[in-house]
Amino acid sequence: MTATIAPSRQTQNPLTAGQLPSWSPWALLGICVAVGAAVAGLIAGASDSDFSLVLVGIIGYVLYLVAITVVSQLIEGGRKAADRLVTGLVVGAFVLALVPLISLVLTVVVNGLARFDVEFFTYSMRSVVGEGGGVLHAIVGTVLVTLWAAIISVPVGIFTAIYLVEYGRGALAKAITFFVDVMTGIPSIVAGLFAYALFALFAGEGVRSGLGGAVALSLLMIPTVVRSTEEMLKLVPNDLREASLALGVPKWLTIWKVVLPTALAGIVTGVTLAVARVIGETAPLLIIAGFTTNMNYNVFDGRMMTLPVFAYNQYISPGVQEQAYFDRAWSAALVLILIVMILNIGARLVAHFFAPKAGR
């Protein structure tokens, strides 16, 4: 006697029941953008104006939020609909934040490539009135001024952070923390005025020097270095400190051999952020470092040109051939962006190779 086997019924997975397919949000987005384009086209035709991609994006985005919320509410329920609505708002905010950044980068790249040639990087602006010339003196000035600013601010910032985390107690630590917070919010022009007033006491009125610019930038770097280093030191587990101290190692040697190597990756990142914070400053360098068309390798003597001041000077004071000055300004801005990018890449490499290795 043979038993008959009933045909198997297709069971429905309860985990995926009542869910939209993965492709449905993209399909809804495409439909909403198409509708937005049609509406924008009708508005442009009725008002005799240009077709606006921005209007297409706004209409399509609003329609998508409404459509995805309603469809998800009908199929998936209220909790999933709220989740998709909030996800759409967050992604929209992210895209909105990217728009000016991408626009800025594209604008600088497109305009900066006009003078991105060998002459631009190997010549200064000495005796150049119209076309030609280069930015070599400004690159040298930026590197030297920023380097001296780092030499001044990095040791001060790191030692201050070590004191606040490892030793600081009582009124002195609170006072230092308060003044670091105040320095974080000072305008850059105030730092330039302070450096000018300080150097004017010793060298007289009208003093201009690259070292003065480095001092002004160091005032802006120190709070960032202190705060970033302080947070990295706080992340070092106390167990490491206690284990070292239990073996009889002095506290200063524990900080040098245990705490700092553990936090080195974060400290390097914080220093890089501080450099990126000040390398594009213009106002303090205009006041104390000044500007020149000649090469100057000595930060202790004479005016020194920097990239932000060079770009500002070329753009604000064009000569007879305006386009040549504008091209040099955009190219200098592109070089400045590339330098910041190289610094960030270098910091990540240092953080990768010097980060403490996990033990077995």
Image (cartoon, rainbow, N blue to C red):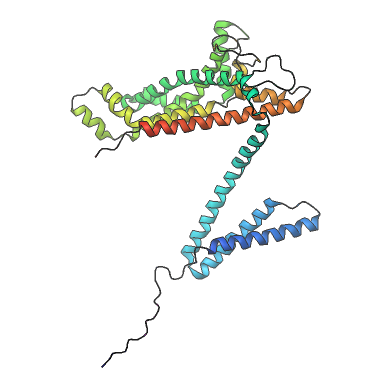
User: For the view shown, which residue lies furthest in the top direction?
Assistant: 203
The image position of residue 191, as x and y in percent, is 55, 20
Closer-to-camera residue (354/47): 354
User: For the view shown, which residue lies furthest in the left direction?
Assistant: 247
* Magenta stretch, residue numbers: 7-11
Please tell me whether the stretch drawn in magenta is mainly helix, strand or loop: loop
Vertical position of residue 59 compared to residue 161: above or below: below
Give the quadrant of the C terminus.
top left
Residue 284 highlighted magenta (yes or no) = no
Q: Residue at x 49, y 17 (%)?
A: 148
Q: Residue at x 18, y 28 (%)?
A: 246
Q: Quadrant of residue 329?
A: top right
Please state if 117 lies on the left or on the right of 247 as rendered: right
Q: Residue at x 56, y 14 (%)?
A: 210
Q: Residue at x 74, y 24 (%)?
A: 318
Closer-to-camera residue (299/134): 134
Please indicate, yes or no, whether residue 185 appears anywhere in the rendered image: no
Vertical position of residue 187 compared to residue 299: above or below: below
Closer-to-camera residue (89/16): 16
Closer-to-camera residue (36/340): 340
The image position of residue 298, as x and y in percent, is 55, 11
Q: Quadrant of residue 328?
A: top right
Please state if 318 lies on the left or on the right of 291 as rendered: right
The image position of residue 40, as x and y in percent, is 72, 57
The image position of residue 47, as x and y in percent, is 80, 55
Please state if 229 lies on the left or on the right of 135 as rendered: left
User: For the view shown, which residue lies furthest in the bottom direction?
Assistant: 1
